[in-house]
């Protein structure tokens, strides 16, 4: 699960923000031997929350080379939308959206997206003193809504990811993984009936 964890939990010591320039790419780089065959489909039902997919930026210029070497790769974002409550947990959709760089495109790669059905939580908060809820989700790939070839996600058809979430009065939500900032999003409802998040972009190399 090495590739997945590096991408899903691209972390920093400060909170991730959904403001300013959304195209900034994380310094986290990942490797894979994969191929993709269709275009990304990033449409989502975001419910009462702001749509985090507005920060998806297809500009792949920051992912054109790997330490100065031209290499096939993509710019990737993790994002998710969930509904539920503090008592029974949450379920929804987790997505990994990939934008192919020119080298990968020349080799037959294309923009694509992997989609998982996700559910789980709630869990106690352990690592983030300022967080309000814990959410450990189990994700199962949804092939019907996935446009990447199976080689992109074959090792990650099912996985578990643990988050702790700080709920701000403004409706913003900071998502943490083992105490490190991992993503940003929004929440709504007295019982936290709706949640979403978007991770920073990260380069993926093939």
Image (cartoon, rainbow, N blue to C red):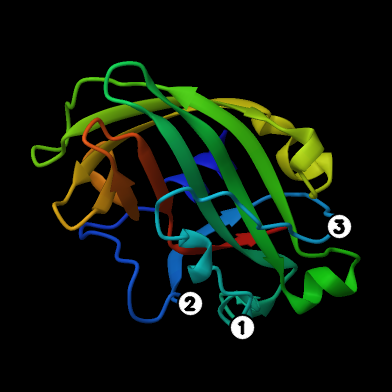
Nearer mark to the viewer, of 3 and 1: 3
Q: Earlier in the sequence, mark 1 or mark 2?
A: 2
Q: Which mark is residue 6?
A: none
Q: Mark 3 = which residue?
A: 38
- The residue wearing badge 1 is 61
Q: The residue tagged with tag 1: helix, strand or loop?
A: helix
Residue at image point 75% right, 45% down: 152
Question: Against 137, is 179 above or below?
Answer: below
Cα separation between marks 1 and 2: 10 Å
Q: Are marks 1 and 2 in contact (CB under 8 Å)?
A: no
Residue in the picture at 34% in, 34% down: 193
Looking at the image, residue 75 sits to the left or right of residue 72; the answer is: left
Q: Secondary structure at mark 3?
A: loop
- The residue under label 2 is 23
Whole-number angstrom distance, CA of label 3 to CA of label 1? 21 Å
- Disc nearer the start of the sequence (3/1): 3
Residue visible at 28% across and 43% down in the picture:
176
Would you say residue 28 is visible in this rendering?
A: no
**Image side of residue 11 versus residue 24, left or right:** left
Where residue 129 sits in the image (x, y, percent)?
Answer: 8, 37
Crowd class of label 3 (few under 14; some 14 to 19; many from 20; radius 10 Å): some
Which of 186/19 is in front? 186
The location of residue 90, given as percent across then percent down, is 41, 27
């Amino acid at each position: 699960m090495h590739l997945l964890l590096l991408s899903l939990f691209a972390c920093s010591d400060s909170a991730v923000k959904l403001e300013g320039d959304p195209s900034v790419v994380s310094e986290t780089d990942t490797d894979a031997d994969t191929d993709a065959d269709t275009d990304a489909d990033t449409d989502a039902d975001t419910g009462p929350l702001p749509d985090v997919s507005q920060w998806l930026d297809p500009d792949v210029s920051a992912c054109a080379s790997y330490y100065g070497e031209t290499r096939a790769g993509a710019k990737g974002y993790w994002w998710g939308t969930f509904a539920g409550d503090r008592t029974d947990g949450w379920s929804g959709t987790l997505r990994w959206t990939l934008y192919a760089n020119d080298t990968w495109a020349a080799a037959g790669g294309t923009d694509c997206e992997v989609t998982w059905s996700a559910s789980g939580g709630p869990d106690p908060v352990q690592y983030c003193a300022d967080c309000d809820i814990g959410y450990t989700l189990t994700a199962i790939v949804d092939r019907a809504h996935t446009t990447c070839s199976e080689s992109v996600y074959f090792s990650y058809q099912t996985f578990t990811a643990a988050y702790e979430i700080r709920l701000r009065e403004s409706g913003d939500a900071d998502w943490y993984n083992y105490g490190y900032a991992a993503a940003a999003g929004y929440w709504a409802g007295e019982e936290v009936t709706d949640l979403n998040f978007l991770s920073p972009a990260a380069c993926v190399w093939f």
